Amino acid sequence: MNKPLKITALILIAKLLTSGCAGPTSPFGAVEKDSKEKLSQREPASLELPKGLEISFSPGRQIYHRKFDLVIHVKDLKGINDVGNFELFYNGKEVQSLLNKEFEWTISENSQRAKLTIKDIKLPVGKNHELNLKYKKDSKTYVKEFLPPDCKMISSERIENVENFQKDLHMLRMVELMAKKQDVSPSFLAALVAQQSGFNPYYVGAEQRLGLMQIRTLDSFLLTNIKDQKEWPSYPEIDQMSDIGLYTKVLLGLINSQNEWRLDAEKSLRGGIEYLKRLEDFWKKNLTQERNDLILASYYSSPHKVLKSYNAAGKSWKDSDEIASVIPKLKAVKSYCYEFSHASL
């Protein structure tokens, strides 16, 4: 028989409203006001779990581009005595309540497994999210971190999950086929298209970006100056149009896939991949683990602007004011990529 621990949202909200000291909020609700003091008094936590203890998250990584249900599983072969030994920390502070939700741990009949389900979590892409589960056992504290998503431009990760993209199946198959031909990760390319254009081949974005891959006009000229202009046409004087003027002409069909290559779905993918590979060559000398992030940031901004920030700030280049606006987009691409490459989500 399960032994659930339930704290209903109504009771918690009532207490918080009457106390007048709800404290800061998080995607999980309110957090304890004195959490930092509590953390400083705790014993050092161990990241290495002992044999017989397993802590896992589902999904396995953070998701930014949509709401999701977070499930935390704990398996302790020695037995779980009290769910009060579990503490969930968000950005260094203990989660006090889940507003408008139920906060429920359930323990299996043999007391070896515990499960917490938190529904409809939304992690804003513009913020950092450090989420840890701490488990106190035998005078020791063990910690498991819910890690952010990761994604590589060059990898063998296939598109395994299309559950939330049924209306885009035809376009996804085109993306997957093109990625395989060009030796690019299908999940990465699909993620970039999802973030850039939502699989709309006629999408018009800011800075004169067009099509599936949202190549800027400036970058379009760079890509097509050595190509056959009949096969890769660019609309005349497009670089002199305002964003609204460009949008209007695309809407009216005056600029279309016949006279602007970026509005041709297949050419947009081919051109986008070629631009990514040029960026990869640009950053080839950079052997750090961040090269993938540098390529993505350059795709959204410009390689020279990113290089300037990287040279000036080193490992803190993502905090640069010049490119701060592109970092949420970079994180969203990784989030999409993780979803596409994991069938279990």
Image (cartoon, rainbow, N blue to C red):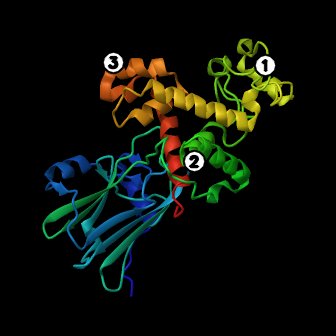
Q: Nearer the viewer, residue 345 or 111?
A: 345
Please tell me whether mark 2 sits on a helix, a strand or a loop.
helix
Compared to 237, does 60 lie above or below? below
**Residue 200 lies in quadrant:** top right
Task: Give me the disc on residue 312.
Answer: 3
Of badges 3 and 2, nearer the viewer stands 2
Amino acid carrying mark 1 in the image: Tyr
Amino acid at dot 3: Ala
- Does 289 sit above or below residue 173? above
Q: Earlier in the sequence, mark 3 or mark 2?
A: 2
Label 3 – label 2 distance at C-alpha: 33 Å
Say which element carries label 3: helix
Rate crowding at label 1 as few (under 14), some (14 to 19) or many (20 or more) other CA atoms within 10 Å. some
The image's mark for residue 186 is: 2
How far across and how far down the image is residue 51, in percent? 21, 71
Is 228 displayed left or right of 15 in the figure?
Answer: right
Question: x, y (%) of residue 295?
Answer: 47, 31
At x 67% / y 29%, what residue is drawn?
Answer: 205
Mark 1 vs 2, N-terminal side:
2
* Mark 3 nearby-residue class (10 Å; few <14, some 14–19, many ≥20): few
Which residue position is annotated with label 1? Answer: 235
Could one spot residue 274 in this view of the protein? yes
Give the amino acid at mark 2: Pro
